[in-house]
Amino acid sequence: MKEIDINTIDEAEIFYRNMIGLKIKTKTKKNKGEFGQLVESAIGHAPSSAHLDLDDGEIKTVCLKPNNQVKEDLKIAKVWDKDYLEKKMKNLLVIVRDTENTIIDVKRCSPLNNPTFLKYFNSEFEQIMKIGLDKVSQSDTIVWVAKTNDSGKKQKNARAFYLARAFVSALLGYKFSSTKRGAKEIYKEYKSNV
């Protein structure tokens, strides 16, 4: 069997586009990270948050609900370094699956290329750091959130940096929906910059 050698976003996009319609079997539906690990290992890469997944970008996965909204926030990284986070988001390849783990789409994006996302990245990152990772709440920010990387264990988990679910939907061209105060105004500003 030929070993797969995929190292760029272009190569990965072609590979995953050929997988659209394929259902990926996971051991459990509860471990949303398992799907992403399987997707990365399909191209011969061991899942790791220590560096970029590919030479020129990062692979992410999201689940799309039947109502055409993204199911959960998009984890960017557990490393709280602004330059590192910017590098992680510069060139994303997002594998979209449905609730049955069938690959339904592949999207490329660079969130910080949108002036609204960049503005809120700068201000909300600073706000999170000012409040402190041990004290910040998801309600303290709107677009970018700090939340625990919950593994289901009882001990306190470290916080990771996420793009809020509603804004992931907007970024990928799916249905935006949020009840968070100020989110609709930010969404309008985001859309004016697309």
Image (cartoon, helix red, strand yellow):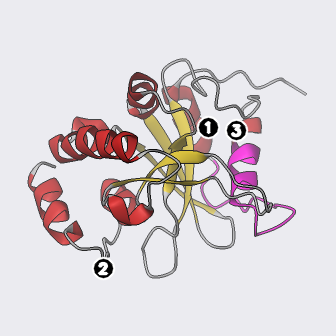
Residue neighbourhood size for the residue with mark 2, other residues' Cα within 10 Å, grouped as few (<14), some (14–19), many (≥20): few
Q: Secondary structure at mark 3?
A: helix
The residue at 21%/42% (across/down) is 114
Q: Position of residue 121 (x, y in %)?
A: 29, 42
Q: What secondary structure predominates along the stretch shown in magenta?
A: loop
Q: Which residues are magenta?
A: 19-39
Q: Nearer the viewer, residue 106 or 113?
A: 113
| Residue at image location 60% in from the left, 43% down from the top | 16
The answer to whether residue 17 of the structure is visible from this angle is no
State how far apart marks 1 and 3 are (Cα).
Answer: 11 Å
Q: Is residue 112 left or right of residue 160?
A: left
Q: Please tell me which of labels 1 and 2 falls first in the chain.
A: 1
Q: Which residue is mark 3?
A: 40
Instruction: Say which residue label 1 marks.
Output: 15
Judged from the image, the secondary structure of the residue bearing numbered disc 2 is: loop
Position of 107 relative to 104 (above/below): above
As drawn, is 53 to the left or to the right of 132?
Answer: right
The nearer-to-camera label among 1 and 2 is 2
**Crowd class of label 3 (few under 14; some 14 to 19; many from 20; radius 10 Å):** many
Residue 20 lies in the magenta-colored region: yes
Name the residue rendered at 37%, 46% in the picture: 128
Locate residue 111, reporting x and y percent.
32, 42
The x, y position of residue 180, in whole percent, is: 29, 74
Q: For mark 2, what is the residue?
A: 179
Real-space Cα separation, disc 3 to disc 2, in angstroms: 33 Å
Closer to viewer: mark 1 or mark 3: 3
Task: Assign the N terminus to one quadrant of the image.
Answer: top right
